[in-house]
Amino acid sequence: MKTTLVLLSLLLAWPAAAEWFTEADLDTARELREAALQRDGGFEIVADLTTRIGPRMAGTEADAKAVAWAVETLTDIGFDRVWKEPVTFPTWERGFERVGVTAPVEQRFEALAIGYSPPTPEGGIEAEVVQFADLASLEAASPDEVADRIVFISNRMERARDGSGYGPAVQARSRGAIVAAEMGAVGVIIRSIGTSTNRFAHTGGMRFDVGQRRLPAAAISNPDADQLERLLELGEPVRLHMEIAAQKTEAYTSHNVIAEITGAKYPEKIVALGAHLDSWDVGTGALDDGAGIAIITEAARLILERDERPDRSIHVIYFAAEEVGLWGGRHWAEKHRDNFGNYQLGAESDFGAGQIYEIGARVSDEAWPVIEAIQAELAPLGIELGGRQAFGGPDFIPSLPYGLAVVDLRQDGTNYFDYHHTENDTLDKIDPEDLAQNAAAYAVLAWLAAQSSIDFGSGPGLIDNGQ
Ligand SMILES: [Zn+2]
């Protein structure tokens, strides 16, 4: 009895991390963290990608070049295995877009067609504009308010550290052209789903469903949307001209590119780090998602450079065709879902290069204390413990219904939507010190997840646990 009590009090006093990690593993995590902060977070990787390949829209020649670049880069770094998995998707080509007001004044607007927009007839369309505050107000309108007009959805994205302003505002982009088509409109213009007050329009995809009718649609810059609102307030009819020369082309096959550090003890068990290789066709995709490519690659490289190999394998996944509809992520989920019991976690870096401030995770109840122990090693980087709702990043969303455990390393996105999906997403927006903080966090996470004495609960058991 007495012995049990002594043992129990010893156990309670023992640092929690000792249950999950050896002292040597914790030392390695700390060394990885400090080593990462002495470097530039893989800045030369994103510099090389955005300089030698530049914009790399899924389905273009630059997409194929980026895949070849990825295989070469990952092979040169010295991963144990590098391979490609094919991903087929419908492609879309911008061509050009012209949007401008023709009455009561004449002015050209800074515009970008929305991905999967159909073209207008040659020469464009011209019609009176009708404004709606958001998608819900459009849905509530009567068809005769909308028929034969160009619908303008004017909702404004709110700036927030966690990017939470994006989700509500982006409805206008993803569904506006479909809803307006059903109501008899002829075209759709939206206020850019971004926070920049400069004259940069913000592109992005609309929902793609085979066979669904959509209208030609474009986003105009925030200052142009302000101007259009003021013109409408004058009370006279406002007419707009829009011409979009976009084309949907044939299905294209690109590749997810995967690199592995083979685990020494449990090579079949996998810690999966992700980022997406494709970008929009504007800017050079430096923040979205060249930064993520650099961060996860640098994190894995820090681990590769050590003498000891991790217990579990670590995968670095460059997903294909994220921007045009999560095609790489969807393909990966279908291909690997039957093996999710062997996946320790998925974590994607796809939110620019701002510093990480919080870790959240969707793992089993048993594994949550391991996440807490990992957070203790991330705390010196300024990373706090978040909650148990996590999605792992866009490319792991299709894996959630199959029970993949996921971790979010949440980045400060206060300024991200000033540049995201615009011509202004270029390399100069990345601070190497911020990139290094990110790489440090991913290296610690990947290493400790690979060394943990328990699994994180991936598989069917995690599907309906209410997390
Ligand atoms: Zn992205």
Image: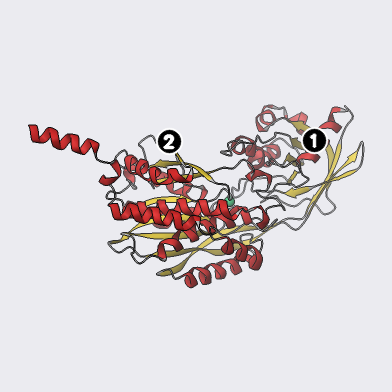
Report x, y in % for residue 191.
Answer: 73, 39
In this rendering, does residue 195 appear at all?
yes
**In-front residue for pair 229/142:** 229
Label 2 is placed on what type of residue?
A: Gly
Specify whether 225 is left or right of 15. Answer: right
CA separation in Å, label 1 and label 2:
38 Å
275 in relation to 258, above or below? above
Q: Report the residue at 43% width, 46% height from top.
A: 378
Report x, y in % for residue 92.
Answer: 66, 57
**In-front residue for pair 221/145:** 221
Within 10 angstroms of label 2, few (less than 14), some, or many (20 or more) residues? few
Report x, y in % for residue 3.
Answer: 9, 36
Q: Report the residue at 67% width, 39% height from top.
A: 176
Q: Mark 1 points at which residue?
A: 226
Total labels drawn: 2
Label 1's element?
helix
434 in relation to 262, above or below? above
In this rendering, does residue 322 appear at all?
no
Dot 1 or dot 2: first in sequence order is 1
Dividing the picture into quadrants, the one containing residue 35 is bottom left
Report x, y in % for residue 441.
Answer: 46, 50
Q: Mark 2 points at which residue?
A: 387
